[in-house]
Image (spheres, grey):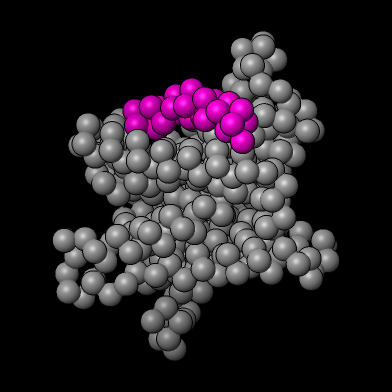
Amino acid sequence: MAFSKTNRPYTLKGLFCVAFIAAVAYGISEFSFFKHLAISPLVIGIALGMVYANTYRASFPKEWERGILFSTKNLLRLGIVLYGFRITFMQIQSVGLSGFVASVLIVILTLLIGYSIGVKVFKLDPEIALLTSAGSAICGAAAVLATEGVLKNESYKSAVAVGTVVLFGTLSMFLYPIVYQLGWIPLGLGDEGLYVGATLHEVAQVVGAGSAISEEVANNAVIVKMIRVMLLVPFLLILGYSLTRSKKSTAHDKQMVIPWFAIFFIIVAGFNSFHFLPEEVISGINIADTFILTMAMSALGMETSLSKFKGVGGKAMLLALILFVWLIVGGFFIVKGCSFYL
């Protein structure tokens, strides 16, 4: 146990190291350069963690690793639960049926396309293919972390997936406003918001791209993005069930894998929908949650050695590129069709 009487001092020291890296990442993210690019502290945290993993990690006391593992598992789940304070059910209702249907279609199709191409065409590790697809389909790094919580995969696989999501999500954030201003996307402001929210990877990237076009686009985009975030819960439940039904599972693994943190995520979102807590309190919770998730990402980076990327990174990057193109092109036609028929 991480916090048994014997292990507690070592776990706390490990946690302090992770918190220190997360604090540095959080501070760096406040610089105007990173704010302008909408690069979240989660991304900076995993980058700093990886730098540490490939330089000074050898000198890290082995006993302190319990703090790193606690961050990648327990703090991760807590962060996902608290993420529910960013969402209300009324937000979903406000974008109407077209926004909901478009979000569902894009999430399902992106997951199916990504996993099928990754495993069957590129012969990619199934977990990496699923993590990369989940990050592209749902909510970027947070989706990768949540999926890891169910798969219990090796940390470097999540790092690979996060890297691809960050690269193409950031590219999309700059590309969408430029393409829209050039008149290459024949959508009104309302539908453009739906398009941005339904196809960009990270919440921060959605805010950045939407705000660069107009306030109306940004507002609609964020709401649609939150629908995709909420779809994380049924995805995790289905994933947990499918793992128990897998023929490769051992008798011990046949116990139902229920991602309870995903259930609590929905409960928290439901509670938040009643606005029981003042805005200042919610804002404080969101800040704390961002730091907790940054700790989880930093710890993930600290567990990631570049030697583990050999033979994996290129295929994962190509898969992410295909999903990037799919979201731009396929997402447009889905949004256009939903707006027309619904």
Say if 111 sits above or below 239 in the image. Answer: above
- Residue found at the far bottom of this picture: 5
Region of the chain picked out in magenta, as a range: 318-342
Q: Position of residue 26 (x, y in %)?
A: 64, 50
Q: Residue at x 78, y 66 (%)?
A: 275
Horizontal and vertical percent position of residue 130: 34, 46
State left or right for residue 117 relative to residue 98: left
Magenta residues, dominant SS class: helix
Residue 331 shown left or right of residue 219 in the figure: left
**Which part of the image, by quadrant, shows the N terminus?**
bottom left
Front one among 319 and 180:
180
Q: Determine the residue positioned at 62% across, 40% down.
A: 99
Q: Does the magenta-highlighted stretch encompass residue 325?
A: yes
**Would residue 80 be seen by someone viewing this image from the given angle?**
yes
In terms of image quadrants, where is residue 69? bottom left
Q: Is residue 46 left or right of residue 215?
A: left
Q: Residue 125's x, y, as percent?
A: 24, 44
Q: Residue at 41% across / 38% down in the picture?
A: 109
The residue at the point 82 percent across, 62 percent down is 280
Q: Examine the rendering and report whether any part of residue 178 can be seen.
A: no
Asked if the stretch drawn in magenta spans residue 181, the answer is no
